[in-house]
Amino acid sequence: MPFELEALVGHLYIAGGRTIHTTPPGALVQTAPKTAARGREVDTFFSLVLPSGRVVPTTFYEQMAHMSAERYFSNGGSVTSALRDVFNTLNHNLHEHNQSGRSHYEAHMICAVLRDDELYLARSGAAIALLRHSGDTFSLPEDMDDDKKLFMAPMGTQPIPEVDMKRFVIDSGSRLLLADAAIREVSLARITQALLGKTLENVLNDFKTLITLQTQMIATEFVVPERKIPVVAAEGDDSSQLSNTITQARTNIQQEAARTAEARRKQSPAIKIGRRMQQTVGETAKGMGTGLEAMSDVAAKVFKRKESEKPLIPPSVIMTTIVALPLALVVVIVLSWIGGLGETRYETCVNNALKNAELARNINQSQLNAIRTAWDVVLANVSECEEERTDDPVIIALKREAQTNIDGISDITRREANLLVSLPGATIRRMLLQGTDLYVLDVNPRLPVIYRVKLDATGTQAIDQDPIINMRSGATVSGLSIGPLVNMTLSTRNLLALDSNGVLISCSLSLITDCTAQQLNTDILRNPIALQVYNANGNIYVLDTGANQVWRYQPTADLYPDRPSEYFTGTSLPQLVQAVDFAIRQDDGEVFVLYGGGYITRHRGGEPQSFNFTPFPPGQDPSDASLQYFYLSGNLLPGFYLISQPTRTIYETGLAGAWQRTYRIFDESKFELLNSVVVDPGQRLIYAGSGNTIYTLHMDE
């Protein structure tokens, strides 16, 4: 009977001849999650995604590694078939994206699976596996000096990937290296000598001296769980190094606030008096003006006399009083400031924020809850100060510092929200991206309409935005009057929209003014809220929360004349009353339904499939936040982007529900009406619709 082994793992990352003390971006080792398919419960999955071609953000390799693990653990069948599916799926996604003419992505990848005492290896592209086992050193490819075998085509460059696979039966003490092609510069004899090091740490230290320029590597030793052995942590897990990095980032933010605050404290009494006088005199004069106007009205009534009579008080006395009284009050107030009888409410607020920030900075770095609480207090101070002023650099810097510290603890990715375009009077409900065309559904009751926003090549500037004349309430298309628009979707060739009367409008993506309309059979629909199309067969699906059903319309020569059929059948139907959106995977037709309660259900052929979010960081569980909408990213790095308007947050997960990032923006007021999101993974851009405005967020700094 095979015995179980566990893996001790370390990493090596060298770039430009310098060791980088972090895990390589495309390196991942994962045990089976709770949602793993049957037969995967005891597997450990290793993945190393390596650069190829042009330089792209490191998050691309991180997400590729996470996707490979998600795909493997969601796939039943044999280990070899699941591994081959991982490579085929990821390669298909990359290749199809590259065929679209957008930013080109490619990568090398090598994977391994440990099951009991069996080790499976698979590679595509220029990557190498080295195994020290039973007194011998094995490699994949077997001949590292054969360029043809080593340098296979990178993933994403051809429709079907070349995959090299091998299986070993190993025992305790076996060691495995997954590395890039740079390891080929080291002779097999020296590799063997390094692999014989006393500990895994010694192995990694030897390779630091053997590979001088660059490498990315996962080093693993397989041991029996009961065996006590020094455990080697990945270099990227050094908490002191991480602490130093965070401290340096904080210092940069703090310096500006400290300089401004110190300059304020060193101001001479004359400057302080002048500043206080300027603030106080203005406020007092404004108040006195209002008061004197009221006094004038009262005097006119009390001392009203006939036009022929003389006034009770001579005009000269009235004028002297009007001028002298406010001046006397201002002098009294200024003297009180000069005498130090108090400070402005705003200055008190700023001083409180500065004191609380200093307290937060001095808390022991291991006390994360205390640090978070302290910086929350600073944010509360800042919010109070911003009620008085919003342009003070001290307060701006303190707010950024507090957000940075809290985000670091809470695993929140904070980004700037850059204005792309505002559509006057619009209420943005949904956005779709096709190349450099961004389609925007405006559901403002006065005139629901779909806009096309033309983007520049970078995707960060709007060149033009116009309503699509045939996709608006009140238009007439193919003799049918268009009512209020419910939702829209994209097929391979057309933009589709459904109105509240069941009219389906279809406009060509190549010529958006070329539109047709047809009346769908909607006599059984109750409350349709969203539609999708499955491009493989042209079926249109409509989410109907009122009928607790997803309706399926099947085409006949580009028309949908028949009554829709039920997607969900049988007695165990999902409860769609709280559903807010749904999506369809184009590669396999799976249906995902999003619920406002913060969860997703997954279905194949109408039958429920397992789906659960993996643990989010503390305080970020979607079930604790209301969700309004989600976007299923397409071929390149597929996954979900979910929005929560109450928390002004965008969550990013993998297809299997694995949390990847939580996005928020520095000025969270811009997301007060957050209601839609779409992503361009090629440009690494998020488009967020809030109210009548669309913002762009860079996924990478």
Image: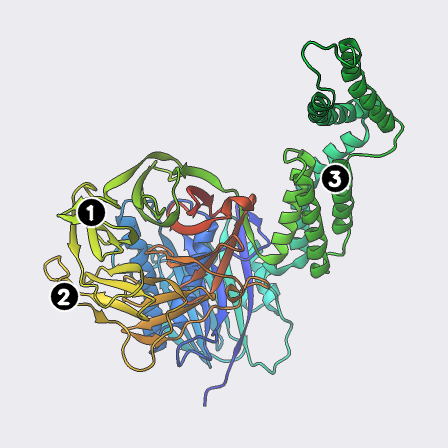
The image shows residue 280, relative to residue 234, as above or below, that is above
Query: Which residue, given by chain and number where applicable, does mark 2 sit on?
Result: 562
- C-beta proximity under 8 Å, tags 3 and 1: no
Q: Which quarter of the picture shows residue 269?
A: top right
First of labels 1, 2 by sequence position: 1
Rounded to the nearest whole Å, what is the CA distance between mark 3 and mark 2? 68 Å
* Quarter the N terminus occupies: bottom left
The residue shown at (20%, 55%) is 503
Alpha carbon separation for disc pair 3 and 1: 56 Å
Kindly check if marks 1 and 2 are in contact, taking CB atoms under 8 A apart as contact: no
Q: Which residue occupies the foreground of this view, 632 or 667?
A: 667
* Residue at 17%, 67% in the rendered image: 563
Do residues under tags 3 and 2 come within 8 Å of each other at their CB atoms? no
Q: Position of residue 603 (x, y in %)?
A: 33, 72
Mark 3 or mark 1, earlier in chain = 3
**Mark 1 secondary-structure assignment:** strand
> Which residue is painted at 37% across and 40% down in the image?
459
- In this picture the colour scheme is rainbow
Tag 3 residue: 350
Find disc 1 in the rendering and name its residue: 507
- Please name the amino acid that badge 1 sits on: Cys
Q: Earlier in the sequence, mark 3 or mark 2?
A: 3
Q: Residues within 10 Å of mark 2 (few under 14, many from 20)?
A: few
- Residue 87: x and y in percent read 33, 64
In the rendered image, the vertical position of residue 319 relative to residue 454, given as above or below: above
Question: What amino acid type is highlighted by mark number 3?
Answer: Val
x, y (%) of residue 660? 49, 59
> Which mark is in front, 1 or 2?
2
In the visual, does 80 lie left or right of 12? Answer: left
Residue 149 in view (yes/no): no
Residue 593 image position (x, y, % from top left): 37, 66
